[in-house]
Amino acid sequence: MQGVDPAWLPDVAFRPIGTRRTLIRGSGPLVDTVHGEVARACERFGGSVSRESGSYDLVLELDGDDGSEGFVYGRGDGCTTVTASGARGLLYGFFHVVRLGETAFLDDAQPASYQPRSALRMLDHWDNVAVHPVMGQVERGYAGGSLFWEDGRARGHLERVRAYGRLLAACGINAVAVNNVNVHAAEARLLTDRIGEVADIADALRAYGIRTHLSVTFAAPVVLGGPASADPLDESVRAWWAGATARVYAAIPDFGGFVVKADSEGQPGPFAYGRSHADGANMLAAALAPHGGTVHWRAFVYNHRQDWRDRSTDRARAAYDHFVPLDGEFADNAVLQVKHGPMDFQVREPVSPLIGAMPGTRLAVELQATQEYTGQQRHVCWLGPMWSEVLRFGIDGGSPVGALARGGLVAVANVGDDPFWTGHPLAQANLYTFGRLAWYPDADPHHVLDEWIRLTFGPGPGLAAGLRSILDGSWRTYEKYTAPLGVGFMVQPGHHYGPSVDGYEYSPWGTYHFADRDGVGVDRSAASGTGYAGLYAKPWADVYESPLACPDELLLFFHHVSYRHMLHSGKTVIQHIYDTHFEGVAEVEAARARWASLVDLVEPTRHARVAERFEEQLRGAREWRDQVNSYFFRKSGVADERGRTIY
């Protein structure tokens, strides 16, 4: 598509395949997709593709079609082979060869099996069909309008949706929810009389093995003219959902299922009828079960009308307290979708204890690729190291989060109709990294970053080194100049961009730092605080309970301490705040200069877009530094030991 950045699938990435002879064996729509990809590469670079036996450099073979996603890759006797027993597996095996590039045709390799660790690797789009008066076309979206919806209806031309599916398949994503979890009036009708629009989108995504999901409102029967109730135990309500779901599958036979946000931030749910979350989820699971569908029930449930004076109510506890008593009560095709941290995608949070506390329930872990609290795709903030830490974390003292996410891995999408897909071209790295970590949670994120750089920008050690230096430490840089030591938030209310240290301190949303003249942080200990630290299995409950044992980066999340409290780093809390905020700005200045030095190595429009975003990032970093440092200087009365300017 003219004028649209190809992201990690530029033409040059297909040169190694396009210059060689390829044999494709098998049949079906996804095999046709693979054949089309190889044929286009050969047309560009002079190779050939055939379905007839002969002598070849690359053989891609589908042996049956059992629905599996794995493949076997190997090379010997001058031929590279990919075999799969499922069509999706052949598609993923083909993109594996693309990622390897020339290496796939030079280095012998014993046949090895590649299987995704997570069966479901999904993106949730918070896209609105009609432009919302407050949130716009895409809620918490920072890359323009929706890929799917425009002027209150599905886009008439879906070539870009198909191209999007291609990008997702190339990094291993296999499912997409196409509308906002906050379901408004226009979105509610997608379930019924507007399901044809969803079917058109599903057709475009299906070519690359992407199953389509739909966010629905729990109150759909009432909103859409069905029964006057949405009680999940009412037989007429259950019958309504069964009929509506059957009609969805008649239009989209491979439909994935529903995503539901209920009894959360004003969205309707089963509490209105005295029912539990399990009752609500199981009603929808029963409607989906005959068709092989799944309901993703989000665990983001908390009291958003708190009294800031009440220190006993702790938003961090909410999901745990709501859902742990329901463990074992959810249907097999009901997945509880849990945010990776207990709050809301902050730059630093502990892993949610809920993930390790529900062994009888299928859990999906939800990450946020769109950078709501990490710079909104105006700041460089590669989240791979954060996600890797989360997925490797032994939440129950042993099992990593990635293994406990039996219901899959989900990310809130960061893509829009911007020519660069993600607004900030370097934010594409987050989308790619999520896909690769969802496939294999133990993957080294730095290896994934190198892979994305090579695919997106092509060969060139100088360019690769420059990009790596900019992206690799960018999450910790962002953390340095924003909220310190795990305290979180400190953002402008509503749009969440830019600093406001007390922005939510006295609001009903429950996000506080409790800074006063003596200290800062939230006491979440079992001994004297909200008890949140005690929700973890050992050894983490003991680690988080003690301010002396607690990791520095989470200290203020778990404890209220004095400004002169000594960290493990050897610095006081207040000096850490001062130092990191100055360091963060200096690191942004260095990254901006490094990007400027790459001007002759990067396509001009891409370079200009990133350069423009760096100017905004530097402005924002300085504002964060000055507001946060000044706030805590005035609270504490403790001067910076290095004598730097604090206002």
Image (cartoon, helix red, strand yellow):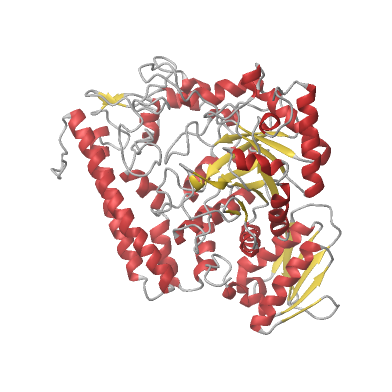
Q: Nearer the viewer, residue 631 or 18?
A: 631
Left or right: 488 in relation to 420: left
Residue 224 picture location, percent across and down: 69, 34
Q: Is residue 114 visible?
A: no
Q: What is the quadrant of residue 568 in the picture?
A: top left
Q: How many marks?
A: 0
Left or right: 369 in relation to 121: left
Residue 272 picture location, percent across and down: 62, 20
Residue extending farthest to the bottom is 46
Left or right: 435 in relation to 35: left
Q: Quadrant of the C terminus?
A: top left
Left or right: 25 in relation to 637: right
Q: Is residue 507 visible?
A: yes
Residue extending farthest to the left is 643
Residue extending farthest to the front is 225
Answer above or below: position of 68 versus 324.
below
Q: Residue at x 34, y 36 (%)?
A: 490
Q: What is the quadrant of residue 603 in the picture?
A: bottom left
Answer above or below: position of 311 versus 473.
above
Residue 516 picture location, percent across and down: 25, 24
Q: Residue at x 58, y 42 (%)?
A: 180
Q: Quadrant of the N terminus?
A: bottom right
Q: Residue at x 40, y 68 (%)?
A: 607
Residue 271 picture location, percent across and down: 62, 20
Q: Residue at x 63, y 63 (%)?
A: 163
Q: What is the quadrant of residue 411 in the picture?
A: top right
